[in-house]
Amino acid sequence: MLTLALCSSFILAAISTLYINASPNENIQLVIYSGSMRPTFDVGDSLTVKTDVSISEIYAAPKPDGDIIVFYSPIRPEDIIVHRAIEKTYENGTWFFTTQGDAIPFPDPWKVEESNIIGKVVAYSRPFYAGTWDGVAYNVTVSTNSTLAQFNFNQSNKQITFNITGYISNAKVGFCNITIPKTLLNCNSLHDWQVLLNGTSITYIPNQNDTHTFIYFTHNYSLQTVQIIGTEAIPELSTWIPILSTLITLTIIAMVYKRKRKQLRLNC
């Protein structure tokens, strides 16, 4: 796997032999280890990079509209950077790109030559923390080409909610694929799930394995509030078991203590 690290304000990467020898039409995976592309990408996000892109397929525009490209650093060719293409120029028969990290208030101090470009980011996956029950932390993973915010799992309402705020690049259609642990939220049937955009039910494609349910849907470019509603949520009682156990233990200790004090008074 290609590993990324932060150096100054840029995302850098050590190059693996696997990706140097990857075929031109092969998608590659990167894992983010820095914050220079926040809030679009965060630490731990896994990026899908399309490598068989032509220069004409890369759209350059100020954030948040320009495509996010992956390229060899013009300063240190052994490093790889993931930043947004904000400007595209043609000079002496060669295309160049001005780039910028979304969390950085100024453009990068270089122009990226077209031969340095590896590909552009077409999707990413992010694990969202849903809560901890009986010492087990649960995550819901969303794979998407959209920018997301305000993820929440509501146990009593048996639903997952989050906002779609835009696309990560110049995409035509947005999509989300949500991976949900069955022990966290589930339905008796794959078609019992409810998926709503801004309060309206939409068509979705469900799938599952032994441990997880997968909900896939597409959406248009606009601010959307997503609700995914199941029929069975992790039992609320489970979060009280450690507390209840502690209360029972303390009650027993108090009873024993009172009994011993009573015996001591009788002996006196």
Image (cartoon, grey):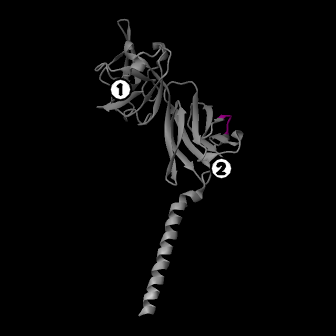
Work out whether 40 lies above or below 265.
above
Question: What residue does disc 2 label?
Answer: 232
Amino acid identity at mark 1 = Ala
> Looking at the image, is mark 2 or mark 1 earlier in the sequence?
1
* Left or right: 154, with 254 as reference point: right
Numbered mark located on residue 50 in the image: none
Question: What residue does disc 1 label?
Answer: 13
* Left or right: 226, with 112 as reference point: right
> How many numbered marks are there?
2
Q: Residue at x 43, y 92 (%)?
A: 267
Q: Which residues are magenta?
A: 201-206
Outermost top residue = 93
Other-residue count near label 1 (Cα within 10 Å), few / some / many at <14 / 14–19 / ≥20: many
**Does 204 appear in magenta?**
yes
In depth, the one of 106 and 5 nearer the eye is: 5
Work out whether 79 lies above or below 157.
above
Residue 146: percent from left, percent from top: 52, 32
**Quarter of the image that includes the C terminus:** bottom left
Q: Is any atom of residue 122 visible in this view?
A: yes
**Does 129 appear in magenta?**
no
Work out whether 225 lies above or below 81.
below
Work out whether 205 lies above or below 231.
above
Q: Residue at x 37, y 23 (%)?
A: 99
Amino acid identity at mark 2 = Glu
Other-residue count near label 2 (Cα within 10 Å), few / some / many at <14 / 14–19 / ≥20: some
Residue 165: percent from left, percent from top: 52, 36
Mark 1 residue element? strand
- Marks 2 and 1, how far apart in space? 42 Å
Residue 174: percent from left, percent from top: 57, 29
Q: Residue at x 64, y 40 (%)?
A: 196
Residue 114: percent from left, percent from top: 39, 13
